[in-house]
């Protein structure tokens, strides 16, 4: 896939016509926006086209009072307009708007342009679109935009909750990276050094000034946006979301499927993953504290069990039947007898190495909490409506919703998972307030 051309600067909306026509000399733009994003940037983009000599500009405005969701109806509406001749869409908006236009353009066999209105997600440049189809969220592989024109003035003026969410989604690359290091150490999924460097080398600098986001400092906003874009490009380069997403995202996905809301509003992706990042940091920190002998005696207390027994244990713990996808993933991850022993031996021989890797990769829990606090991200489960039951539920279920190997699998295979869940939720060392 061709990586997108990315223009990030103050006043970039004025550059859209020139860049658009450089990419597509014979095309006409179709601006796709909602009420808020039309005000934030859509109007200015239209004006720029008119000033550049475009006679008329086609606009598809989702003029709905409520937030526009990335669902089939909106995708179809864009496809209906876009199918006509020489139009190329410009998605003016944040995550959902971009996802709608990304999928619609892909299904029409057309490229598209994106004008982001908030530094809120890493999905702008990712090769997929999460879309709700018949009530279920599906992540559909599709082509990212060929052109991204990000106006830092527009990004700065985004609602603070969206800026804060973007920060949460970027901080998540710390634990996402840690999960990859674990999988790499065990030979499950090797780290791709080029992709790793793209995300991880600039990461500490990009998340280092959370308070500057609250004052809408342009350099800090640009830095977070760039970090999110780099992550999207890394996903594009790698071919899946491993460079961007680990155990913290799995927690977020579980809570999302449960419709996690607080004060009547759905909790944003970035705030869910911020909380996931804290929880998995707590868990990984505990892993670094467990001596090799204690880990080995833990697995000896937890001998290999049949798949049926494992299924019963999971269903009892979750209070629900596993659906067909979860059964498949649980089966794929299921190790028994000699296979399990082989994995455990490998974990034992790499235990000190894994602990050292985690120490090097993680931000200390207290420091991480302080960083998230300063960026107005939630730092207590209760702040996003999570009670103890839902945190436990997430930590059990996360392992079986995706094939990805994370710290949850490591802990499970060593017989440590249940004890670590108890410690993270109940010890009082990590979290003080639950819903
Ligand atoms: Zn994310």
Image (cartoon, rainbow, N blue to C red):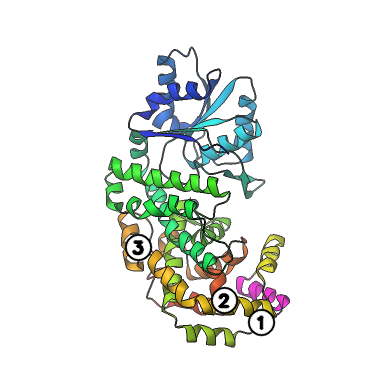
Instruction: Check if residue 128 falls in the magenta segment.
Output: no
Whether residue 435 appears in this view of the structure is no
Residue ID for mark 2 = 346
| Inter-mark Cα distance, 3 to 1 | 36 Å
Residue 122 location in percent, x, y? 47, 46
For disc 1, the neighbor class at 10 Å (few under 14, some 14 to 19, many from 20) is some
Please say if 193 is above or below 45.
below
The residue located at (52%, 68%) in the rendering is 185
| Inter-mark Cα distance, 1 to 2 | 16 Å
Q: Of callouts 3 and 1, which one flags the residue occurring earlier in the amino acid sequence?
A: 1
In the image, 250 versus 136, the foreground residue is 250
Instruction: Check if residue 314 falls in the magenta segment.
Output: yes
| Residue bounds of the magenta highlight | 305-319
The residue located at (64%, 39%) in the rendering is 72
Q: Of callouts 1 and 2, which one flags the residue occurring earlier in the amino acid sequence?
A: 1
Mark 2 Cβ inside 8 Å of ligand 1: no
Residue ID for mark 3 = 368
Residue ID for mark 1 = 304
For disc 3, the neighbor class at 10 Å (few under 14, some 14 to 19, many from 20) is some
The quarter holding residue 367 reads bottom left
Q: Residue furthest front?
A: 193
Q: Of callouts 2 and 3, which one flags the residue occurring earlier in the amino acid sequence?
A: 2
Whether residue 146 appears in this view of the structure is yes
Residue 300 location in percent, x, y? 58, 87
In the image, 351 versus 17, the foreground residue is 351
Quarter in which the C terminus is drawn: bottom left
- Give the dominant element type of the magenta stretch: helix, strand or loop: helix
């Amino acid at each position: 896939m061709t990586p997108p051309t990315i223009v990030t600067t103050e006043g970039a909306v004025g550059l859209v016509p020139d860049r658009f026509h450089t990419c597509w000399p014979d095309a006409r733009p179709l601006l796709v926006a909602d009420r808020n994003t039309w005000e934030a940037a859509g109007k200015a983009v239209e004006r720029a086209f008119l000033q550049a000599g475009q006679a008329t500009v086609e606009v598809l405005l989702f003029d709905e009072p409520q937030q526009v969701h990335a669902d089939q109806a909106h995708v179809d509406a864009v496809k209906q307009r876009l199918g006509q001749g020489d139009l190329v869409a410009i998605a003016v908006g944040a995550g959902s708007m971009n996802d709608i236009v990304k999928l619609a353009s892909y299904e029409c066999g057309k490229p598209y342009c994106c004008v982001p209105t908030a530094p809120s997600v890493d999905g702008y440049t990712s090769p997929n679109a999460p879309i709700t189809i018949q009530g279920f969220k599906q992540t559909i592989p599709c082509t990212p935009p060929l052109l991204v024109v990000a106006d830092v003035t527009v990004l700065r003026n985004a609602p603070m909750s969206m800026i804060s969410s973007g920060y949460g989604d970027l901080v998540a690359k710390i634990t996402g990276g840690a999960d990859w290091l674990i999988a790499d150490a065990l030979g499950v999924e090797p780290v791709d050094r080029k992709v790793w460097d793209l995300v991880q080398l600039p990461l500490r600098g990009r998340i280092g000034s959370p308070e500057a986001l609250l004052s809408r400092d342009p350099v800090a906003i640009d830095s977070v946006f760039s970090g999110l874009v780099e992550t999207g490009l890394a996903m594009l380069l790698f071919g899946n979301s491993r460079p961007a997403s680990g155990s913290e995202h799995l927690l977020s996905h579980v809570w999302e499927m449960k419709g996690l809301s607080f004060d009547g509003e759905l909790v944003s992706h970035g705030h869910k993953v911020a909380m996931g990042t804290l929880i998995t940091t707590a868990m990984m920190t505990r892993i670094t504290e467990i001596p090799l002998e204690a880990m080995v005696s833990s697995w000896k207390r937890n001998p290999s069990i049949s798949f049926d027994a494992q299924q019963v244990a999971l269903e009892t713990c979750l209070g629900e039947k596993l659906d067909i996808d979860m059964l498949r993933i649980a089966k794929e991850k299921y190790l028994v007898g000699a296979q399990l022993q082989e994995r455990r031996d490998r974990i034992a021989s790499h235990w000190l190495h894994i602990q050292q890797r985690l120490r090097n990769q993680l931000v200390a829990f207290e420091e991480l909490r302080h960083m998230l606090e300063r960026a107005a991200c939630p730092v207590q489960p209760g702040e996003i409506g999570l009670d103890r039951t839902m945190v436990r539920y997430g930590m059990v279920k996360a392992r079986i919703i995706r094939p990805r190997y994370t710290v949850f699998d490591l802990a499970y295979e060593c017989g440590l998972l249940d004890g670590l869940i108890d410690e993270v939720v109940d010890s009082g060392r990590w979290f003080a307030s639950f819903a």
